[in-house]
Image (cartoon, coloured by chain):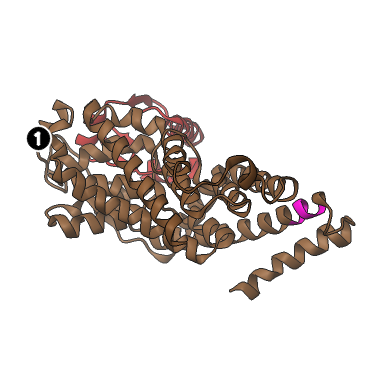
Chain colours: A brown, B red
Amino acid sequence: MPSILSVFTKLADYLVFDLLKFTPESHWGGSLHFFVEDITKIYALLVVMIYVIGFLRASLNVEKVRDFLQGKGKLLGYVMASGFGAVTPFCSCSSIPLFLGFTQARIPLGITMAFLITSPIINEVVVVLLASILGIKFLVTYILVGMGAGILGGFFFDFIKGERWLQDFVKNIPAAPASCGCEGSCTPTQSYQQKPSVEERHRFALSELKGIFKRVWIWVLVGVGLGALLHGVVPDDFVANYLQGDRFWSVPVAVFLGIPLYANATGIVPVAESLLAKGLPIGTTLAFMMSTVAASFPEFMMLKQVMKVKLLATFFAFLLVMFTMVGWILNLVF
Amino acid sequence: MKIEILGGGCKTCQDLYKNTEEAVKELGLSDVEMGKITDMQKIVSMGVLMTPGIAVDGKVVASGRLFTKKEIMDVLKK
């Protein structure tokens, strides 16, 4: 795979050094080269990845996930929910209907939480970015932590009987069978009924590609642009000198800052790359990334409608502790 | 015909509303009443887990993501 990707290096070499006549040693030359190479590489990878995942995912939807999870035992449930969360896209405004729907199907809170925790962390865009910018090792660590956080979260929330702290209307929601039969005529949605044909999968994949690309292209541009600036302009030991890349306090601080921040997983990856290159410890960087991506202020506001403040605060505390520990462990290990 | 957009009100739901309006106009459908359902409990009781969604005369016909004008037109044609 590295040999295929070197085509982007060569493209950047040609555009920046041959056509535009920058020198590799100059700050601007270095930044521009980084920018061109990364942007072309990432856009190309994104197109491929989003299409492929979209194609495969055409028959999966959240209603099916709920049906599948219903009645599953807890341990298996956490793992599956986290796994499903990893492959389904996440929109913070659908966290509420999702939460209610799962509860209605009498799926234990822990399993719902496993899904909710992992879902925003893992998606095809961030996978492409991590693999291409930070390397496979980082990607695997990220995925393991993302799923681990979901699974552990599942255990945690059921262990503390978190369902006591749901809003009353959620606790009292009448159980409903997975498929319809509830009030009125609720016809299963189109996508739920038939298994999609190849042509339908292709059309779905294309629309996913257009939709996602339209949403993220600018963030990738900004993120890579920022990364390029840092790459060429900020001196290599900036972090060591000014931020004192210390491995202890930087972690909880990074996590505390990261949780309420609403960051697109897309834009933050190239920034993380530059921070890493400038000396920020791996654990701290990963902890910051995960906490930024795992939760956001808008999402918390949405969840407040179904969770009592106590549960929401516990969720925040769980993420804080979880990612801080991950950061510390990784700082020690790497 | 009553067409309702199901969702909490975030940008995706608003975009879906716009796309649906355009789809209706392009299909030349008359006597269409457009509406919004934002009450989460009602949305869930209609069977939708992932907003936004579209319901025609109380029946959910599509849900899960922002559909394009063309996709909505295909759905409405049926």
Residue A41 lies left or right of residue A52; in this view the side is right
Rendered residue at 42%/27% (across/down): B30
Rendered residue at 35%/45% (across/down): B78
Residue at the extreme right of the image, as rendered? A21
**Image: magenta residue range:** A29-33
Please tell me whether residue A30 belongs to the stretch shown in magenta.
yes
Q: Chief secondary structure of the magenta span?
A: helix
Where is residue A145? Give x, y as percent: 37, 55
Tag 1's secondary structure? Answer: loop
Rendered residue at 24%/58% (across/down): A79
Where is residue A158? Give x, y as percent: 15, 45
Is residue B2 in view? no
Is residue A211 in view? yes
Rendered residue at 66%/57% (across/down): A38
Where is residue A303? Give x, y as percent: 29, 32
Residue A26 lies left or right of residue B57; in this view the side is right
Residue type at numbered disc 1: Pro
**How would you rate the neighbour count of disc 1 (Cα within 10 Å): few for under 14, some for 14-19, many for 20 or more?**
some
Kindly identify which residue carries mark 1: A174
Determine the chain carrying the residue at label 1: A
In the rendered image, the vertical position of residue A25 relative to residue A6, given as above or below: above
In the rendered image, the vertical position of residue A221 relative to residue A8, given as above or below: above
In the rendered image, the vertical position of residue A30 relative to residue B31, given as above or below: below
Please tell me whether residue A154 belongs to the stretch shown in magenta.
no
Q: Quadrant of the N terminus of chain A?
A: bottom right
Where is residue B75? Give x, y as percent: 38, 44
Q: Total of numbered circles in the picture?
A: 1
